Image (cartoon, rainbow, N blue to C red):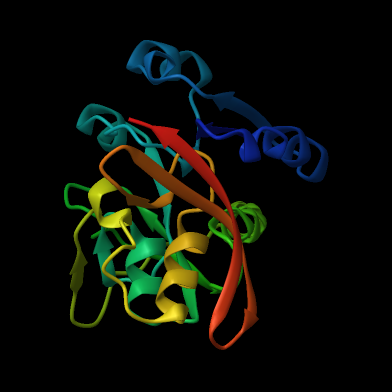
Amino acid sequence: MNFIIASEKKWNKNLVGKLNQDTPFTWESINKKEDLSIDHLKKINPQKIFFPHWSHIIPKEIYNRFECVVFHMTDLPYGRGGSPLQNLIVRGHKSTKVSALKVGDGIDTGDIYLKSPLSLEGTAKEIFERANDIISEQILTIVNKELVPKQQTGEPTIFKRRTPEESNISELNEVEDIYDYIRMLDAEGYPMAFIETKNFKFEFNAVEKVDNNSLTANVRIIKK
């Protein structure tokens, strides 16, 4: 059987090699939008296509023809929508679940294969690395146990995708909130937490707690 891993992120770079070693199946990788085409997929004829991290819309003609699996960092149907990690942390969550779901017509509305717990401690980069390990195990479980997805149950909660402007920490009043904002945006591809003056922008990462009233962090100062 053939399977595909479609991902744009370098933390999924070694996943295909690992899966080819750990399973008797053939695994192919796709990391460019233009390679996710019907013609290309027909040549591979995958049993399933897994999307550990994919920012593009998956065309309907693809998920109607091939079984497509995505991964969402909430306990669905809670937290459907954008920026799940940041939306969870700003709401005070300390842990979540990674939901593996079948792609369908709605946003994060597909049937669920399985869910796995995930801690929200540490920086966004650290959380994504843990999530990547969990997703790798979920992919193996889905394939080896031939899991059949089940319909979501419960009351849906919708998350709105956060904007770069919402990374501004100048109006925050609590040290804990500043800590959370800096760490939840501390990963490649995310707009760092910042404050602005008339002439400069200050971007923060690598935050650490000193005590209940103080933090240390790296700062990048950018002249406007």
Q: For the view shown, which residue lies furthest in the right direction?
A: 21
- Judge whether residue 198 can be spotted in this image: yes
* Count of labels in the image: 0
* Residue 60, placed above or below residue 131: above
Q: Whole-percent x and y of residue 142? A: 56, 57
Location of residue 59 in the rendering, given as x and y in whole percent from the top left corner: 24, 29
Q: Nearer the viewer, residue 150 or 97?
A: 97
Q: Is residue 104 left or right of residue 205?
A: left
The residue closer to the viewer here, 189 or 35, is 189
Residue depicted at x 58% and y 61%: 123
**Image quarter in which the N terminus is found:** top right
- Look at the picture and state if 10 lies above or below 128: above
Q: Nearer the viewer, residue 40 or 13?
A: 13
The picture places residue 42, in percent across and down from the top left corner, at 42, 17
Which residue is the extreme one toward the front?
199
Residue 92 sits in which quadrant? bottom left
8 vs 131: above or below: above
Say which residue appears at 39% left-offset and 69% top-offset: 74
Whether residue 191 is visible: no
Quarter of the view holding residue 116:
bottom right
**Which residue is located at x 26 percent, y 68 percent?**
171
Q: Which image quarter holds the C terminus?
A: top left
Furthest-bottom residue in this view: 212
Going by the image, does 28 lie left or right of 203? Answer: right
Residue 179 percent across, percent down from the top left: 49, 71
Report whether 37 appears left or right of 175.
Answer: left
Foreground of the two, 57 or 93: 93
The answer to whether 86 appears left or right of 130 in the picture is: left
